[in-house]
Amino acid sequence: MAILAATTGVVLVLIGALHVVWAFSPWPLATREALARNVVGRPDGTLPLGFFVPASFAVAAALAAAAYLVAAAADVLPAVLPDVLVTVGVWGVAAVLLGRGVWGLAESGLRLGAAPATYRRLDLRYYSPLCLALGASAAAVALL
């Protein structure tokens, strides 16, 4: 279980780091407009910086907290919270990630909303399956 928790935690931290990068740069895409269309699903290609930068940092912080909770639940890292809060937190992580994965598959698969076709393809192929895998991993850690 420690390997699953550590792997899940590392992936969550890496995704969080990518969100920090996106606060300053559209990498690996060429422009902020491409980032808005292909990663955020904005059909008009706009990302209001006054909203996007704080949102990127908030997502990165949430992912770091999620990584910590998963690692602490499996004793990969020392828990600074009571066990019950760690367990509830990991279940919360699992619920959010599983919910995002299911919603993404439904939204992109059924073509709900106005997201660009490229975003829908990426969501169906990468974003939603990754969320489902991470959510399932967090749930497995919470169960044991």
Image (cartoon, rainbow, N blue to C red):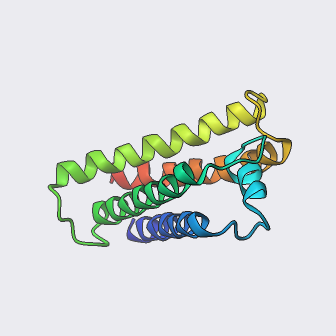
Above or below for 53 versus 78:
above
Depth check: give the residue in front, 94 or 34: 34
Describe residue 57's horizontal placement relative to residue 115 as left or right: left
**What residue lies at 62% left-to-right and 54% top-to-bottom?**
130
Number of marks: 0
Describe residue 46's horizontal placement relative to residue 130 as left or right: right
Q: Quadrant of the C terminus?
A: bottom left
Q: Where is residue 135? Give x, y as percent.
A: 50, 49
**What residue lies at 17% left-to-right and 65% top-to-bottom?**
80
Depth check: give the residue in front, 40 or 111: 40
Q: Residue furthest left?
A: 82
Q: Where is residue 21? Give x, y as percent.
A: 58, 70
**What residue lies at 65% left-to-right and 38% top-to-bottom?**
104
Above or below for 77 versus 54:
below
Above or below for 104 versus 35:
above
Q: Quadrant of the N terminus?
A: bottom left
**What residue lies at 44% left-to-right and 40% top-to-bottom?**
95
Q: Residue furthest right?
A: 117
Above or below for 7 versus 87:
below
Depth check: give the residue in front, 94 or 65: 65
Q: Where is residue 129? Give x, y as percent.
A: 66, 49
Residue 30: quarter of image: bottom right
